[in-house]
Amino acid sequence: MPNCDAMTLPYTPLPEIDQKVQASRDFFFDKQLKLSHESDPRKKDLQSRQFQLKKLYYAVKDHEDELIDAMYQDFHRTKLESVFSETTKLMNDILHLIEILPKMMKPRKISDYSPPFMFGKTVVEKISRGSVLIIAPYNFPVLLALAPLAAALAAGNSIVLKPSELTPHTAIVMEKLLAAAGFTSGLIQVVQGAKDETSKLLDCGKFDLIFYTGSPHVGSIVAEKAAKSLTPCVLELGGKSPTFITENFNSNNIKTALKRIFFGAFGNSGQICVSPDYLLVHKSMYPKVIEECKLVLDEFFPTFDKETDLTRMIHKRAYKNTMEKLNTTKGSKISPSKTLTNLDADDLCIVPPTVIYNIDWNDPLMKQENFAPVLPIIEYDSLDETIDEIIKEHDTPLVQYIFSDSQSEINHILTRLRSGGCVIGDTVVHVAITDAPFGGIGNSGYGNYGGLHGFNTFSHERTIFKQPYWNDFTLFMRYPPNNAQKEKLLRFALERKPWFDRNGNDKWGLRQYFSLSAVFMLISAICAYRSS
């Protein structure tokens, strides 16, 4: 039976970190130098990237059982939950990146028919950022480390990966599988460690992008350190994500709704950044919701003891913090009816799934993200007053969940409350949608990834414009000496005219008129060129 804080991870010596960072940078520039000597650099680069992703896929596939066992050792995660939430999703993501890579790497043509650009050629290409740093969390230690890593590989970067020190067994297996994959030396560097090692990485100022997943508190530190070297960041954070059961929800579906809410709230022991953190129930639904909570909890957990398939809290500090909230709340609690008392909870970090009701916004469970298998429920009367309270206390959550059968009510909530994402009629499953962007807003982070969005995040869009030499007769007006005729011609040729009046009303027919402007501009330019 895994215990809290049971293993110490061998950390990377601090002097070696600078060497790993420099090796990552050297690898990237050496790779680009070799590509520059190819007759078709983009084709060669595509083949190389796909080959690296294929290596990663089979490395994960071959070590899947070891990863699952390591996660069980770290925090008692069951095989079913790890397969469902991590390894299957990860391998599917890698395969998808291999499939879409040719299309994503193809330059995109841009058309601009104004005189300075009409004879030129404009394309936008996506180039690698360089050497990137990925700092992974503990709650999904495989997926949230290797999915960004796969996206970074697809974008052609070299990578320094810092796994979570709080899941040491998993961190060791990940380093092992990356070494066994057969990547070119220097492509992927792994740094094991905690605060000191992470600070060393952040302070070096030698990365072209930092991708961090974790708490808002640490995220702000990452952003502050990155700003000193103007290093861009992607911050995947968390927050208190609300769930609504509104007055316009069909009460016959309350049990189904609670199953879906509990799936998100108690899965992984609530240690999910998109977990439903608290439940807001309209007063007309409140009595039945509380009644059904007891039934669904007992259905999910017929008995609850230390052998129950439930992920443990990650360490004693998290366990004690959760128990302190549960001991100080003034609310009423519902747990599985057959919860045994001899759980050895202090050693095993077991918190039974718990619903807390008859509370208000001042309850200890409503102050910060709980990140535990607890679900506070607040009864409300006015939807707008409730949204006002959310905006005041916990604005810009990572996600919001809505159980309502009124589209106008759903639109009302979505319009008023900003969030990184939203799910209607379910919870947490949106993170598995291929090519849907996943990311936060405001306090829940910035930037996103997922499928093509991950590729875009780890790439830079570079505009390339090629101007021919024969068309200088259309450009002469920009050259000295300046005169009134050139100014008049420039204004006529370049300045667009509005198709609406000062009151904002469209002027009928002007769009058709101005669609011919390019022809007249060209004729005017030719005539002026000849006369000069």
Image (tube, grey):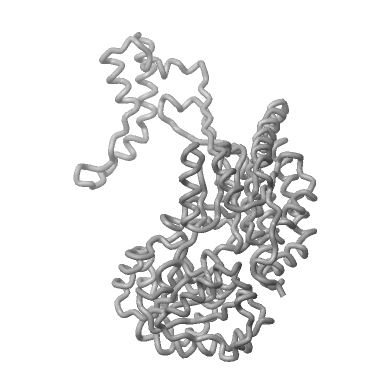
Q: Which quarter of the rendering shows the C terminus?
A: top left
Q: Position of residue 283 (x, y in %)?
A: 35, 84
- Picture coordinates of residue 407, whole percent (x, y): 39, 72
Residue at image point 68% right, 51% down: 11
Residue 96 falls left or right of residue 265: right
In this picture, residue 442 sits left or right of residue 298 = left
Q: Is residue 107 visible?
A: no
Q: Is residue 263 above or below residue 470?
A: below
The reply to whether residue 312 is visible in this rendering is yes
Residue 473 picture quarter: top left
Quadrant for residue 491, please give it. Answer: top left
Q: Quadrant of the N terminus?
A: bottom right
Q: Residue at x 69, y 60 (%)?
A: 8
Q: Position of residue 448 (x, y in %)?
A: 52, 52
Question: At x 35% / y 63%, what residue is drawn?
Answer: 415
Q: How many marks?
A: 0
- Residue 344 place in picture, x, y as percent: 64, 80
411 left or right, relative to 105: left
Q: Residue furthest left?
A: 503
Query: Relative to residue 227, is residue 259 depicted above or below?
Result: below
